[in-house]
Image (cartoon, rainbow, N blue to C red):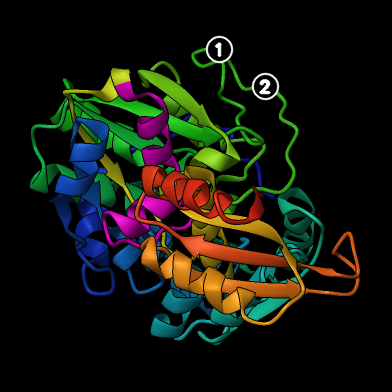
């Protein structure tokens, strides 16, 4: 990738110019106060719904602003970018609207749904490398060979200015926030927030959040540290090295950085779906994960955060919700050892219904799982109203059957 180490600063005027420039193709998404989340956190929570963008993410803001500034010669040669998902779709959509040729380099592990979504906008997709850095090397080779213009996913002043429009809109709708919590990957979004809030609402504190496997700023305000990387549900912020431009803006401008783990992100995704009725990907749920994990810090404060993206695979979303419900005890997985005789399955089902439980799944094993040829193992997954109700169901069934909870 090209060197982005210059100290070019992004100003409020840059963000306002970007807002006018991208208004025709980017939705002005609402910021709403959410009563359910406020009750859970005991804070006054406002959420910026950028998961409602056409591509389901804030990322198109920056892509749209940068691509609107292309010269006629740059347009003629086309554009190229590197992304595992949301930025890829943003560049692809903008290229289709501007009638530009676009090449998107994506790491080989990129989920098929995101590859298909990017291709659906007419872009050429090249799968290369096992991670972002390796994909960048391929993109640089193609950029030079084909004389394309790079649309960097985060480390470009025009991209940062475009992302800042998210903060500008949020402040227009919620002008009296005590603090905001913003996910940090490459740093483009939080750099945009810093640019806007420091100019228009300097009293509002700004906190970043990273996921544990990708938390180079975990010791902020100290400099970035090496991180282990690896798989994460929050792939939208799975960046090992934040951008140079972004670090120049972030430097001593944040009030702190929170780090959350995978299970906290899963719980936040579930809470947004169940309580706020919002679909969020892992990166988009990271701010809520930080708020839920630091209850006393946020209690009583007016807190805003963007749901930065909603592009989560439906199967993964279903698994995340089920895993969260299992951890919370609202779904029980009970294993019964029962005599192998007719009628017992019906009797167990009747008792579960009488106790108010909802049977989700039943698995009956006679041949291999049971300890005796005269017994059977029955595995039943049950939905309960809450943790207390689940414990009551388990206790009542234990009075009649040999049962254990998994």
Instruction: Using the rendered view, name the quadrant where residue 145 is placed.
Output: bottom right
Residue 270 horizontal/vertical position (percent): 42, 53
Q: Quadrant of residue 294?
A: top left
Element under label 1? loop
In the rendered image, the residue lying farthest to the top is 222
* Residue at 50%, 46% in the rendered image: 395
Q: Is residue 73 above or below residue 116?
A: above
- Left or right of 7 on screen, residue 5: right
Of residues 387 and 61, the one nearer the viewer is 387
User: At 22% across and 57% down in the image, what residue appears?
Assistant: 19
The residue nearer to you, when weighing 1 against 241, is 241
- Give the prevailing secondary structure in the magenta stretch: helix
Q: Quadrant of residue 368?
A: bottom right
Residue 222 vs 9, above or below: the answer is: above
The secondary structure type at the circle numbered 2 is: loop
Residue 9: x and y, percent?
Answer: 38, 33
Task: Report which residue position mark 1 lands on.
Answer: 222
Q: On residue 225, which mark appears?
A: 2
Q: Position of residue 109 (x, y in %)?
A: 75, 63
Task: Assess whether residue 270 is covered by the magenta stretch.
Answer: yes
Q: Are marks 1 and 2 in contact (CB under 8 Å)?
A: yes
Relative placement, left or right, of 72 versus 262 is left
Q: Is residue 159 visible?
A: no
| Magenta residue check for 135 | no
- Number of the label disc, if any, that sits on residue 291: none
Per the rendered image, the range of residues in magenta is: 269-295
Foreground pick, 93 / 388: 388
Q: Residue at x 56, y 41 (%)?
A: 263
Whole-angstrom CA distance, mark 1 to mark 2, is 9 Å
**Percent position of residue 214, x then y:** 63, 36
Which of these two is toward me, 136 or 111?
111
């Amino acid at each position: 990738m090209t060197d982005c180490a210059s100290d070019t600063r992004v100003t409020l005027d840059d963000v306002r110019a970007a807002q006018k420039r991208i208004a025709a193709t980017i939705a002005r998404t609402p910021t709403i106060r959410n009563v359910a989340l406020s009750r859970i956190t005991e804070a006054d929570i406002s959420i910026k719904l950028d998961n409602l963008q056409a591509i389901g993410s804030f990322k198109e803001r920056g892509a749209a602003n940068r691509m609107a500034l292309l010269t006629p010669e740059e347009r003629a040669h086309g554009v190229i970018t590197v992304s595992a998902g949301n930025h890829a779709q943003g560049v692809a959509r903008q290229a289709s609207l501007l009638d530009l040729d676009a090449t998107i380099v994506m790491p080989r592990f990129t989920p098929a749904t995101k590859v298909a979504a990017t291709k659906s906008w007419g872009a050429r997709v090249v799968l290369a490398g096992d991670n972002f850095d390796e994909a960048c090397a391929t993109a640089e080779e193609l950029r030079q060979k084909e004389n394309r213009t790079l649309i960097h996913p985060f480390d470009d002043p025009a991209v940062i200015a475009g992302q800042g429009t998210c903060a500008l809109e949020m402040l227009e709708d919620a002008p009296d926030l005590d603090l905001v919590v913003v996910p940090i990957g490459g740093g483009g979004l939080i750099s945009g927030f810093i640019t806007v809030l420091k100019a228009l609402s300097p009293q509002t504190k700004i906190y970043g959040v990273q996921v544990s496997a990708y938390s180079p700023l975990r010791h902020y305000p100290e400099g970035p540290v090496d991180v282990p990387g690896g798989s994460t549900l929050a792939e939208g912020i799975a960046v090992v090295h934040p951008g140079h431009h972004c670090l120049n803006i972030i430097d001593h401008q944040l009030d702190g950085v929170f780090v959350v783990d995978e299970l906290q992100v899963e719980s936040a995704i579930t809470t947004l779906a169940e309580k706020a009725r919002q679909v969020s990907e892992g990166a988009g749920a990271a701010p809520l994960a930080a708020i839920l994990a630091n209850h006393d810090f946020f209690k009583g404060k007016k807190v805003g955060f963007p749901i930065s993206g909603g592009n989560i695979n439906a199967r993964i979303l279903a698994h995340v919700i089920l895993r969260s419900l299992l951890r919370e005890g609202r779904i029980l997985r009970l294993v019964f050892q029962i005599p192998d005789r007719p009628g017992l399955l019906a009797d167990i089902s009747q008792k579960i219904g009488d106790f108010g439980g909802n049977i989700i799944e039943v698995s009956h094993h006679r041949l291999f799982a049971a300890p005796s040829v005269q017994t059977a193992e029955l595995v039943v997954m049950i939905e309960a109203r809450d943790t207390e109700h689940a414990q009551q169901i388990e206790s009542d069934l234990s009075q009649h059957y040999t049962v254990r909870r998994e």
